[in-house]
Image (cartoon, coloured by chain):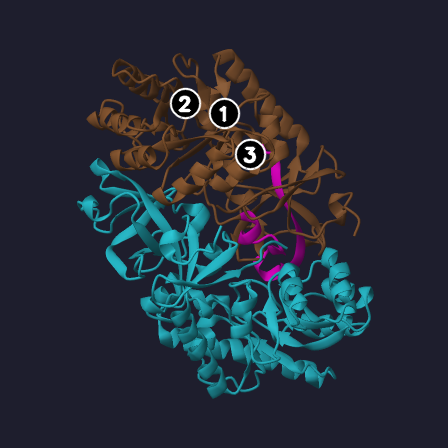
Chain colours: A cyan, B brown
């Protein structure tokens, strides 16, 4: 078969990436980080795709991964400076050693003495960042906790204390720009405090790493921070729109689907875009505007504001008017192509193995593969 | 690398399938369908795996798929009698024609005149089932609706009216065995009524197809039905447990993950089993027992009833006591392997590309690949 040349020649459901929107998102983050004087270490957990990661990365710069599969994917393409940003499980240390032996400068993360001791014991010289809890939402050591120096000491008995990192995931719970800016300062202060304590204890700790798309874009000052990890900004999504991080027309990712039927009595459109294609993520459920399973656009990407994907089965999407009112089904005959903007780009992209790249129009300018798994 | 021989030699997270439990689930459905005198047309949307589909299928029998990718996967292995059970989108008809030209006896589904006309026009002789709405929950034509005969007539202008099908997805909203049994009878009555009307109008309509795991297992009588499509029964999951369809120890699928840290102040365990590995499905959220993101078991598969996965990030699981009380973290040191039973087997399996098969113990007896995509 020939490569598809237009969105109208694809089988649905499939993933569409708007290159112009992505380019705008990339430029925005680059401008912001340059203004703040910090390097990017973009997180490729959202895209899992080389052509996109290369556009996010500084020339010759490093990346962040959420799986060793992503590390393998990017290392195979020549990226060597890689941070695996999930607390290391002991059963992954042989794989880490293998990647490092092949020339990958892989850094791992620890937040406790046991993991630090396991890293130090498995291979001399393995570098790790100490994960800092800056917002009480997930993992990490609090910056003033005695465990910080104990963990660093355990790591230093064989490993290398390369620095500190944190992820202010609580920024996703903020409901104003001011709150996100305050969270960015809290994130910064936590890691700078921890790095200062480590250095006072004799560890070089050159890396001070923060990152989330909201805090990266709303930070006013990142003094003491050396690098920013963010990932979802490249696509944006409805959670970011709900947080006020970007307008709706910055969302670069959508799922192309087809109308497959009508339920006239219920005022529903049925599509072949179910939760397998859109994901089960309901990240906007608690927001002032609940976007259901996604905002519906026409095939050109223009929102149809009165519609929402209100329910999904595995391979079925159910669309109705937001107000629940009568729907003019004749506007959407069977076969109509629609594009659904995702709640959470990381989750939606995960169901797909490629991006169909368009540049504003319907012509497909590239097909970019994406990875999966662990 | 050598193939892993034991759960303790795997990198986490990954998918584990308990063969003994699966065999019990398979035997239960087979016994039930034999007692009811209907054929199985198992749905492979849950497993997407040949060795599992072969165990579900009657010798030489047909299967049901949710994507044309599944049809390709099973057709390549010699399965020819395949029902694609999602209302057909016009952009898939070239692919359908191609599969049929290669010898696959692929049947499609329509629930409206426009789709029926598209099928009839694209290739003479393409068989389709008319989808019947038996429970008001998703797609289909109501059995007494005039649209039934109009759709059959449109299809018959080139295609073949092979029969009717329905899926009583509303069985997932039932809260008692009696309610599920009643739903099974409602499902049966709807398709038998529709088939009778079609036959009276001169269509042969030999196939009368129903299917959901709850209604298949709780039906008392399927007179007039020729085949049953069910899929999730092969693994079972916490939704099925919550519905009373099976006990907890019938759940054959689990996600193996590792403890990667402790948050002592919060009484949390952190694992590397996040929503990417478990899925975002919260199918038990509205049940009397909300299972969070999954029931936690030890590495042998024995439940640890006081624990639950209460929250997830992409690659992090947060586990706590169900009662929110103090957790004895020393029982679960970093590196401890845990197995998490899924809310929804279809969604959880979708994140993984293989099953690690065990037979009660920790030894891996087989690795079975699974498919994905469309």
Foreground disc of the pair 1, 3: 3
Q: Are marks 1 and 3 on the same chain?
A: yes
- Residue of label 2: B209
Residue B167 shows in the view: no
Q: Position of residue A199 (x, y in %)?
A: 69, 84
Viewer-closest of B204 and A66: B204
- Residue of label 1: B41
Residue A279 shows in the view: yes
Q: Position of residue B219 (x, y in %)?
A: 44, 18
Q: Is residue A156 left or right of residue B199?
A: right
- Residue of label 3: B75
Q: Position of residue B253 (x, y in %)?
A: 60, 38
Pick the quarter of the image with the C terminus of chain A: bottom right
Q: CA distance from mark 1 to mark 2?
A: 9 Å
Is disc 1 placed on a helix, strand or loop? loop
Q: Is residue B152 magenta?
A: no
Question: N-terminal of the two: label 1 or label 2?
Answer: 1
* Dot 1 and dot 2 residues touching (CB under 8 Å): yes
Q: Residue at x 51, y 36 (%)?
A: B71
Q: In which chain is the residue bearing label 2?
A: B
The magenta region covers B251-278
Q: Is residue A370 depicted above or below B110 in this figure?
A: below
């Amino acid at each position: 078969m020939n490569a598809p040349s237009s969105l109208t020649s694809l089988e649905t459901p499939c993933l569409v990436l708007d290159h112009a929107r992505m380019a705008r998102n990339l430029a925005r983050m680059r401008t912001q980080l340059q203004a703040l004087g910090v390097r990017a270490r973009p997180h490729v957990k959202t895209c899992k795709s080389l052509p996109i990661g290369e556009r996010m990365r500084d020339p010759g710069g490093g990346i962040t991964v959420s799986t060793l599969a992503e590390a393998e994917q990017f290392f195979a393409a020549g990226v060597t400076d890689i941070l695996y940003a999930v607390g290391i499980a002991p059963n992954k240390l042989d794989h880490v050693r293998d990647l490092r032996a092949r020339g990958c400068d892989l850094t791992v993360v620890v937040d406790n003495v046991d993991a630090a001791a396991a890293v130090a014991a498995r291979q001399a010289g393995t570098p790790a960042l100490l994960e800092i809890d800056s917002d009480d939402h997930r993992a990490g050591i609090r910056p003033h906790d005695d465990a910080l120096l104990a963990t660093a000491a355990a790591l230093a008995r064989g490993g290398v204390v390369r620095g500190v990192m944190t992820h202010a995931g609580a920024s996703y719970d903020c409901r104003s720009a001011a709150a996100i800016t305050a969270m960015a300062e809290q994130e910064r202060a936590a890691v700078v405090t921890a790095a200062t304590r480590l250095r006072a204890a004799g560890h070089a700790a050159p890396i001070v790493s923060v990152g989330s798309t909201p805090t990266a874009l709303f930070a006013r000052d990142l003094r003491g921070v050396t690098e920013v990890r963010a990932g979802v900004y490249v696509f944006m999504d409805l959670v970011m729109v709900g947080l006020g991080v970007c307008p709706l027309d910055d969302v670069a990712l959508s799922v192309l689907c087809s109308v497959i039927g009508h339920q006239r009595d219920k005022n529903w459109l049925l599509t072949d875009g179910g939760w397998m294609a859109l994901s089960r993520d309901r990240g906007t459920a608690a927001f002032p505007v609940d976007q259901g399973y996604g905002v519906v656009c026409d095939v050109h990407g223009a929102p149809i504001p009165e519609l929402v994907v209100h329910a999904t089965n595995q391979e079925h999407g159910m669309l109705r008017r937001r107000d629940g009112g009568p729907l003019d089904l004749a506007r959407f005959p069977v076969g109509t192509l629609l594009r659904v903007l995702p709640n959470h780009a990381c989750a939606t992209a995960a169901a797909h193995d490629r991006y169909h790249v368009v540049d504003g129009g319907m012509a497909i300018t590239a097909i970019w593969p994406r990875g999966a798994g662990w």
